[in-house]
Image (spheres, grey):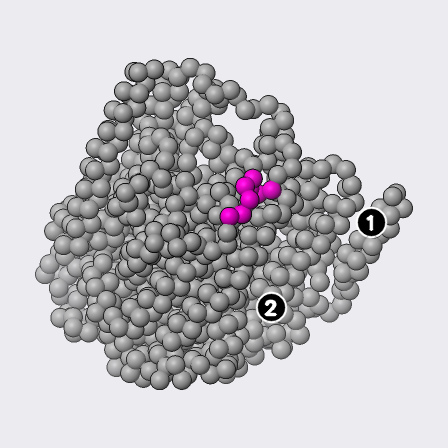
């Protein structure tokens, strides 16, 4: 009996042990884990999965995507801030977690806690109404709000999202009283619009794009720097006379701080190539997150810190923080 | 035309794979269809669009079928929508009637699913307009109605059930508040930012606690002490359940339509209504077959209903639909009002494949009943470690978080203690499911109405729901007081 | 039994008081404009009142059922609870395969302390079969731990 036991133990150890051997040569030698801070199916997730999928051929290893949703991306970022910077733990998120959240809530991480790899998409926001709405242009909406204080209902996707803050700033500067009705996700917000429960909504492109294509919803204005390619007849908020409200939010991949530059360079390279593949372009086009000139590495970091600083000023102006 | 498309071999294959995976996913408690679909979504990039959608859809309603299996066999719901099935289904299994329970569940699901598909085909357009009229005030009143229905789910002390409900509500508020953006009751634990998570709670409360209870007895035992009485529902079973199935289907389909509504709510509303109109309500919870037929039909009808907003309006009613939505988009197909016009083959292909899928599931599941019933003969001391492992895995795979495992353990212990003190788990879990939507809708409605409560009464649908809720509440209280009077009389006589 | 019931209702009372204070801190608002703590506040007050009633009910009732609380009854659940806690601790460090193997062995051992290498064998099979189904078939991702055990 005793020998049987010993033999069994040995088999066990050998079986497991054989699998445990790993050789460390050039990076990457084993699958990389990418933590996505949002639920599957959302814009962040789809874009990240495509990047991961397409970059496999350039990196030579699998990039495995794991969803750890929570707190609008903040749980994942907190976890990543404590991860090992060996290049095998990466993350994908929206920039608002980095440039907005640290101002507004007490999160246990800051901008400097991460190494930024690349931007894989842009969140475009827009204001839309249903087809039969009496509001024909964005100016109509503002006029209505001015003449009828406290009557305009605007559906938003979550409190203090980038576009919500922009609208709050608008309301402040024009002295308007608007009622913001928050929903938790683009889908319920659009549903409320279609059901007539709110008059206007402000969402990211993943919210309004399918409905605009389907013809049930009309886009009034977008928040980007230039007109969107997909809807060239829709003016930007800059053209409407509010240049300070131009907002942009990005999808970005990142890792913990102090990652080796050679590793970061390799990743930037691979992800960049992944974004040029037609499969990626197709998905990006559908969710309208495609970026013509995505930012990488150092440029991205610089742009993010600028964003962070500007946001601080904007929030102080709007009165969100002291 | 749709049948032409869906009967092609490749689509049949994808359908089969889909329902197979779906059943597996549904049987494994905790492992929801969403995660699996997310993983499989990249495959759909390379497969033809119709086939991929068929597969993903198959996974979805396959999981509704599979979820009931574990509910009946081991009192652990495989899906949130199967929680109610545990109540009577497991009791039936304990009486040796696991076969009929599984059988009626399979048949009921099939009938409901098929009728649901027809409903989808015929009534999609007008129904969706009805569904759109449900705004925040309507949801709020619906949730109130749901909470009152909690009262109908109790067998034991009413006060304890209500306190479990209150506790469930409280637990559901933990996490980030969507209206104000503030973080509540998390006491600085990051992982709680998104709330406690229903699956770990359910696994702990129903699963671990149940196993602990069973472990108290010494000696060898199988899962149940009695021997198996037959594998399929008897004629009497059918007679008892047929109306339950029909009612369940109708209720389920309508509730499934509502974006954000869906299967869990459908199953327990259906169960409660069944109990309410039954001639022997006090037998619910002891193993009546209507108590299985009704919720199972409801949740399958609800999954058919859930397709309506997606296919006609392009609005996904839940996370699973959102994945299907993404899948369609990848293939250049925009679900919405133009889907029928631009891609009728996809529209009809999906619908007919749902019908075929239902048939496949029935064919798959019926022979498996024999297999499942054999499993109940396996000695408990071998089964329970496997069950615990399955629970752990199910919980972990949700968010890849060990913290969720901790939640499960904690609630397992709490659930065990609660059970010993005669508190029932069901009201807590159901309140937990309803809580977020209740609060959200209330506050959204008040923003829309500028603080006026009139909005709940002025809008017709909302007023009707509140009226039903009040009616149920009043009849429940008068019913209770009659029982209490009987109890008091009995005590006095002793 | 009676003591356990009392303890439970007391804990519920304690919990509801805790939640009430938290709700007040984050702001309850009023009926026109409910704050984030509004419904939590209401629910916990309800819980407080009901738990109180239950407590009184339990205290009035005599010692009804005999306590089913000997060590004999509690031993298995307690051991499993401890094992589960250990499992949760080591899961990430040791990886799925190894920690689940240890857990399974312990759980199987509880029932019949003899023939423990037989249990290890069964545990081995079960853990690997689940790994096969979950990781390979359903593409679930598990931690591999510091020994990087996977296949």
Secondary structure under tag 1 reads: helix
Q: Which residue is mark 2?
A: A63
Image quadrant containing the N terminus of chain B: bottom left
Secondary structure under tag 2 reads: strand
Residue B400, by quadrant, is: bottom right
The residue at the point 23 percent across, 29 percent down is: B482
Percent across and percent down for residue B432 are 38, 44
Residue A223, by quadrant, is: bottom left
| Chain where mark 1 sits | A
The residue at the point 57 percent across, 48 percent down is: B376
Label total for image: 2
How many C-alpha atoms fall within 10 Å of the one at disc 1: few (<14), some, or many (≥20)?
Answer: some
The vertical placement of B323 against C57, above or below, is below
Seen from the viewer's position, the closer of residues A66 and B353 is B353
Which residues lie in the magenta part? B222-229
The residue at the point 80 percent across, 53 percent down is: A12
Seen from the viewer's position, the closer of residues A257 and A282 is A282
Using the image, tell me which numbered label, if any, was put on residue A9: 1
Q: Can residue B442 be found in the magenta stretch?
A: no
Percent across and percent down for residue C58 are 39, 20
Image quadrant containing the C terminus of chain B: top left
């Amino acid at each position: 009996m005793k020998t049987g036991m010993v033999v069994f133990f040995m088999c066990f150890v050998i079986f497991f042990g054989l699998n445990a051997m790993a050789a460390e040569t050039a990076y990457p030698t084993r699958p990389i884990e990418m933590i996505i801070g949002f639920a599957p199916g959302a814009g962040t997730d789809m874009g990240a999965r495509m990047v991961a999928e397409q970059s496999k051929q350039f990196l030579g290893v699998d990039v495995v995507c794991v969803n750890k949703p929570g707190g609008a991306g903040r749980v994942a970022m907190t976890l990543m801030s404590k991860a090992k910077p060996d290049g095998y733990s990466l993350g994908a998120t929206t920039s608002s977690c980095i440039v907005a959240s640290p101002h507004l809530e007490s999160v246990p991480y800051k901008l400097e806690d991460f190494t930024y790899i690349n931007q894989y998409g842009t969140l475009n926001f827009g204001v839309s109404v249903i087809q039969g709405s009496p509001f024909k242009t964005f100016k109509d909406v503002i006029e209505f709000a001015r003449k009828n204080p406290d009557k305009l209902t605007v559906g938003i996707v979550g409190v203090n999202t980038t576009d919500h803050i922009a609208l709050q700033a608008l309301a402040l500067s024009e002295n308007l009283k608007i009622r913001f009705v928050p929903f938790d996700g683009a889908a319920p917000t659009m549903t409320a619009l279609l059901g007539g429960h709110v008059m206007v909504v402000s969402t990211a492109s993943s919210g309004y794009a399918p409905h605009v294509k389907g013809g049930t919803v009309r886009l009034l204005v977008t928040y980007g720097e230039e007109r969107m390619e997909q809807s060239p007849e829709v003016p930007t908020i800059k053209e409407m006379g509010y240049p300070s409200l131009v907002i942009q939010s990005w999808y970005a991949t990142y890792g913990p701080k102090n990652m080796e530059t050679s590793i970061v360079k390799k990743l930037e390279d691979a992800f960049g190539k992944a974004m040029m593949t037609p499969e990626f372009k197709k998905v990006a086009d559908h969710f309208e997150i495609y970026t013509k000139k995505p930012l990488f590495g150092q440029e991205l970091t610089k742009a993010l810190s600028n964003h962070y600083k500007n946001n601080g000023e904007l929030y102080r102006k709007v009165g969100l923080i002291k | 035309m749709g049948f032409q498309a869906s009967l092609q071999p490749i689509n049949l294959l994808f359908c089969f794979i889909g329902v197979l995976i779906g059943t597996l996913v549904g049987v494994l408690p905790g492992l929801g269809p969403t995660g699996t679909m997310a993983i499989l979504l990249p495959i759909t990039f390379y497969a033809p669009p119709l086939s991929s959608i068929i597969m993903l859809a198959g996974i979805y309603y396959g999981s509704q079928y599979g979820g009931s299996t574990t509910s009946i066999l081991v009192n652990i719901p495989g899906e949130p929508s199967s929680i109610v099935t545990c109540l009577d289904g497991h009791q039936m299994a304990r009486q040796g009637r696991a076969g009929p329970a599984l059988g009626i569940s399979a048949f009921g699901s099939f009938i409901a699913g098929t009728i649901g598909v027809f409903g989808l085909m015929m009534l999609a357009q007008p129904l969706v307009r009805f569904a759109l009229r449900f705004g925040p005030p309507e949801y709020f009143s619906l949730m109130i109605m749901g909470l009152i229905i909690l009262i109908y789910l109790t067998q034991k002390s009413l006060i304890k059930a209500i306190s479990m409900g209150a506790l469930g509500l409280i637990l559901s508020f933990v996490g980030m508040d969507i209206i104000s953006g503030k973080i509540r009751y998390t006491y600085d634990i990051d992982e709680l930012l998104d709330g406690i998570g229903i699956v770990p709670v359910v696994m702990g409360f129903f699963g671990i606690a149940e196993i602990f209870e069973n472990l108290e007895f010494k000696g060898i035992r199988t899962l149940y002490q009695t021997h198996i009485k037959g594998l399929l529902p008897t004629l009497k079973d059918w007679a008892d359940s047929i109306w339950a199935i029909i009612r369940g289907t109708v209720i389920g389909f309508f509730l499934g339509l509502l974006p954000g509504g869906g299967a869990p709510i459908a199953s327990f509303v259906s169960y409660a209504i069944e109990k309410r109109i039954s001639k022997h309500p006090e037998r619910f919870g002891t193993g009546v077959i209507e108590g299985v037929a009704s919720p199972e039909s409801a949740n399958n009808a609800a999954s058919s209903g859930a397709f309506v907003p997606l296919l006609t309006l392009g609005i996904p009613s839940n996370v699973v639909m959102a994945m299907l939505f993404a899948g369609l988009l990848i293939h250049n197909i925009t679900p919405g009002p133009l889907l029928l016009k631009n891609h009728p083959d996809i529209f009809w292909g999906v619908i007919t494949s749902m019908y075929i899928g239902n048939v496949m599931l029935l064919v798959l599941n019926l022979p498996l009943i024999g297999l499942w019933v054999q499993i109940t003969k396996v000695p408990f001391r071998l089964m329970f470690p496997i069950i615990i492992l399955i629970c752990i895995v199910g919980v972990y795979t949700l968010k890849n978080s060990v913290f969720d495992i901790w939640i499960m353990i904690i609630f397992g212990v709490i659930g065990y203690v609660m059970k010993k003190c005669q508190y029932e788990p069901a009201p807590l879990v159901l309140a937990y499911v309803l809580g977020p939507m209740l609060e959200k809708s209330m506050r959204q409605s008040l923003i829309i109405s500028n603080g006026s409560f009139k909005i709940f009464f002025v809008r017709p649908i909302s007023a009707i729901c509140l009226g039903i809720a009040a009616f149920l509440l009043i009849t429940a209280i008068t019913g209770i007081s009659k029982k209490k009077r009987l109890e008091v009389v009995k005590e006095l006589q002793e | 039994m009676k003591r356990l019931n009392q303890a439970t209702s007391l804990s519920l009372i304690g919990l509801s008081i805790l939640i009430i204070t938290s709700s007040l801190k984050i702001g309850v608002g009023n009926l026109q404009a409910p704050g984030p703590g509004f419904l939590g506040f209401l629910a916990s007050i309800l819980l407080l009142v009901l738990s109180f009633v239950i407590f009184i009910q339990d205290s009035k009732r005599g010692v009804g059922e005999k306590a089913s609380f000997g060590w004999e009854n509690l031993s298995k659940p307690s051991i499993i609870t401890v094992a589960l806690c250990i499992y949760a601790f080591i899961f990430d460090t040791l990886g799925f395969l190894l920690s689940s193997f240890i857990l399974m062995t312990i759980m199987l051992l509880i029932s019949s302390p003899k023939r423990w290498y037989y249990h290890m064998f069964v545990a081995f099979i079960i853990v690997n079969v689940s790994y096969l189904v979950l990781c390979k078939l359903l593409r679930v991702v598990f931690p591999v731990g510091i020994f990087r055990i996977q296949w």
